[in-house]
Amino acid sequence: MRKLFYLFMACLGFAGCTKDSFVANFGQKPEERMAASIAEVNAVLTSAPNGWVATLSTLDGGGYGFYMNFGANQEVTMYGDLNDNTSSALGKSTFRVKTGLGADLVFDTYNYISMLADPNPSSFGGVRGTGYKSDVEFTYQRTNGDSIIFIGRAYRQPLVLLKATVAEKTIYSTVDGYKTAINKVKNFFETISNPYIEVVSGSSTQKVALSIDVSNSLTAGKRTIFASVSGDGKTISSVTQKYAFNAEGITVVNGGLVWGNITFVSFKWKDAATMAVYDATGKEYIIKSSLVAILPLPNFLDSFGLDTDNKAYYSITVLDASKSTNFQAIWDAIAAEYSIYSTTPVSFIQLVWQATGGDNVLQVRVYTNATSYLRMNFGVSLDANGVTIFRYISSSSSNTVRGRFTKLEKFFTGTYPASTFTSGGTIYNIPADPNPGSQPKFVWSWKDSRYLSNGLGGMFVMDNSGEKTGVSLIGKVGRGTAHTSW
């Protein structure tokens, strides 16, 4: 039945929503037919012994998941995946089914669904006046097997309810059951290195990188991204779709994510430690881990193109107050080393991707105030194993800056050579790195960092107007799974 449901939802995504409410009986008056429709929708909603697993897409934000029970007393109880509180604390409100454009389901007191429509940004972070552009009134569209589908009256987003199984009810009814299920998925993506699935097309097998964003960001939150290097070996292709958490994993909403001729509809646990993606036909694609990035860094950054001054998108800045615990020691070492040569402290660090003259260059800018910076340029390439490597090219003031930032250079290259430079009339002789490789090193890994529940991760690709939607970079520090926040 679930396979049929997903096939139906995939078709719904392609064909749109065609209203085919209860068959009219023209022997009845219009008000009698509407009363019968309302009674029937009420009966369906209150007749699910194990409750309903629901998904709701928002117009401006992502997708959201719920578990609901509708009572004959017109009270509805629910959990939602909006945050830790909504996924662990049982919410209660009232509902009614009334005459509207058809038989309308109305949540008429405040609940977790109302949070998405709340016009006050302080309630859940939506836009003032419109929230996430979601509804609290939904018009009945159809019943399909164990599912019932409504459409939001104002923003026309689907609210899909699927009858829960006994096993699902057990998870949702267990204390913190839904929250635990959500956190298990988050932890899976936090700890796996370069997750991907294999998609077979003819005689070739394509590695498709994937990630999820668990934030509630309007522009990128609650979305999953699939991406790969195209057949030319250079172009990056990607597709984004909204999703919702459920007791078994993830439901991809809006009919699923379409990759070529495949529609992916869910992420589920194959066993206690293995997660798979499933398409609308029920075919399974195991999520695997790679030691090297599926999307090589030069290809990835080149896919953004160049702006008018021949420089690509800026990363988010590294501020002293916004570093992760893992990067703290490295930041302190960089700042302490520079303080030997200057009384002006390091203010922040910024990265700029350049592709001038066909050379892939990552420029690291160390700012000492809002506008002045010292720079180091690193060439970016791949080694024989496909691992992104950085090599020092040049720095400010005829390379004299290099000796002031040996810790920074080591962070990218793993070591630094001997150097000599003059600063303030003093000659400094910097010996070669006595312990190459002893410090955690920056390693390229494609993920969307905002899903990280521990608050780590995130070197984001930026353009002049803000974050490049749906894409980010992440610095993975050390030889384990620790991440650093840039």
Image (tube, rainbow, N blue to C red):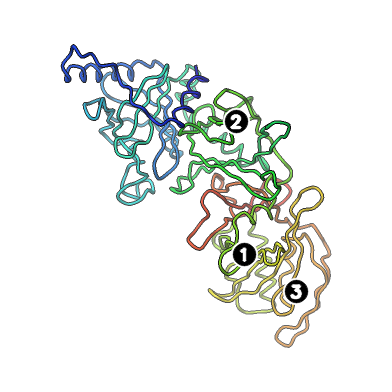
Of 168 and 299, nearer the camera is 299
- The answer to whether 349 is drawn above or below residue 239 in the figure is below
Instruction: Give SS at disc 1.
Output: strand
The quadrant holding residue 437 is bottom right
Residue at x-position 21% and y-position 17%: 33
Q: Which residue is mark 1?
A: 352
Q: Position of residue 160 (x, y in %)?
A: 40, 28
Distance Cα–Cα, label 3 vs label 2: 49 Å
- The answer to whether 83 is drawn above or below residue 395 in the figure is above
Distance Cα–Cα, label 3 vs label 1: 21 Å
Q: Which numbered marker is on residue 277?
A: 2
Residue at x-position 42% and y-position 28%: 54
Q: Circle 1: is it few (<14), some (14-19), or many (20+) Cα within 10 Å?
A: some
Q: Which residue is mark 3?
A: 403
Q: Which numbered marker is on residue 38?
A: none
| Dot 3 amino acid type | Gly
Q: Circle 2: is it few (<14), some (14-19), or many (20+) Cα within 10 Å?
A: many
Q: Position of residue 403 (x, y in %)?
A: 75, 74
Distance Cα–Cα, label 1 vs label 2: 35 Å
Q: Position of residue 154 (x, y in %)?
A: 30, 39
The quadrant holding residue 416 is bottom right
| Dot 1 amino acid type | Val
Mark nearer the viewer, 3 or 1: 1
| Dot 2 amino acid type | Val
Of 173 and 9, nearer the camera is 9
